[in-house]
Image: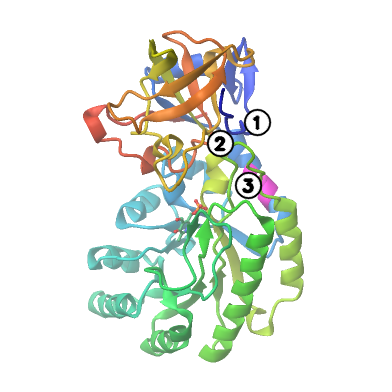
Amino acid sequence: MSKPLGPIPHGFGERDGELAIDGHRASDLVTQAGRTPLFVYSRSLLSARMAALRAALPARIGVNYAIKANPHRDVITHIMPLADGFDIASAGELRLALSLGLEPERISFAGPGKRDEELEPAIAAGVTLNCESEGEAARALAIGQRIGATPRIAIRVNPDFELKGSGMKMGGGAKPFGVDAERVPDLARQILSSGAKWRGLHIFTGSQTLSANAIVEAQANILKLSAQLADQIGEPVPKLNMGGGFGIPYFPRDVPLDLEAVGSALHGLIADLPAPLAETDLCLELGRYLVGEAGVYVCRIVDRKVSHGVTYLVTDGGLHHQLAASGNFGTVVRRNYPVAIASKMGAAPEETVNVVGCLCTPLDRLADDAALPRAEVGDLVAVFCAGAYGASASPSAFLGHGPAAEVLV
Ligand SMILES: Cc1ncc(COP(=O)(O)O)c(C=O)c1O
């Protein structure tokens, strides 16, 4: 019995019986890169996703890119003219963003545990800090005084509600993220009276949700809470980062997020915006939704073997680049990502096989009991939905195989 594979995202093609990405045959891209494994990111799919968002969302709502999802330089450079803002999570991402010429006014820095040596360059550059605690805000203000710069500070709020159906919840109850909502007004008043530049609120409640209803409910709650906080603070909120959490379908039976439904509900919420938010700049902060489906991971079969009647296609890829596809990054039950034999795209399935990586651990699985066309040593395997949290969120130093190549086409 074979197990189903996740849905291959729209927008990939076939040329001469091979997977084609933006018209390029997978084998040609591998030849150009000089090696496998290779992450390929598609410019046209990145642009199309952003265009779909702009078409669905009210113009009033900006779209920020969370660089953590894919910090490849060419990917960020491609997104720079398309997105409004950029969210960073470390001094490393700050250096990367600034080195690419991103304007500091477009950058916000979230994440618990920001060290002084990260806060200082961020304040000096003039990026917005989404402060995660009173302690962090105090350190930021002290650093600002010491270096003679005015910190730009927003408060990340830990709301009392969560993003339902979210793969990773980041709000509701005790959390290491943000300041509990009831303590936000006091902290905001301290920031205002310190002379720092008050930048407003950040409410990021979770990640990887496919339910439009859950996202809309969270957004309605976020607007309501922000209006209450603005009232309690007694000053307008210049900017409200409403978070995101838009998910992508990775697994069999995952139903894509209904973007139109989210967009039309947001039009309604904006038309009815609470008075304290009338002048507030609004934005969403998206990572995987912008880049996840635009990337594919291509690796090569190096061995084909049978053990106790089970066929294994052993590739030169694996969990050191594809931790999430192996089922070891935040999933409870392992399910198959969309996987295909890239050199036999469109061919009918002929056999049930296990596709594994080259690491000597039973965790290194790319597809279990997958019905695929017959593949031999030398054939290419494609793992889709590889554009987010692939290269950068996998343990590429593990066992010394080294990082994969990456290319934007
Ligand atoms: C603060 C913050 N922003 C953005 C993201 C990006 O989430 P996603 O890639 O699921 O959109 C995360 C994910 O953990 C996050 O913690």
User: Which residue is denoted by mark 2 in the rendering?
Assistant: 294
Foreground of the two, 377 or 241: 377
Foreground of the two, 380 or 319: 319
Which scheme is used to colour this image of the protein?
rainbow
**Residue 52 drawn in magenta:** yes
The residue at the point 40 percent across, 90 percent down is 193
* Three-letter residue code for mark 1: Gly
Asked if residue 195 is positioned above or below residue 50 in the image, the reply reads below
Q: Position of residue 264 (x, y in %)?
A: 76, 60
User: Which residue is denoted by mark 1 in the rendering?
Assistant: 11
* Three-letter residue code for mark 3: Met
Q: Which residues are magenta?
A: 49-53
Report how far apart the C-alphas of labels 2 and 3 lie in the structure.
Answer: 11 Å
The residue at the point 47 percent across, 45 percent down is 76
SS at mark 2?
A: helix
SS at mark 1?
A: loop
Contact, CB < 8 Å: mark 2 with mark 1? yes
The residue at the point 46 percent across, 8 percent down is 376
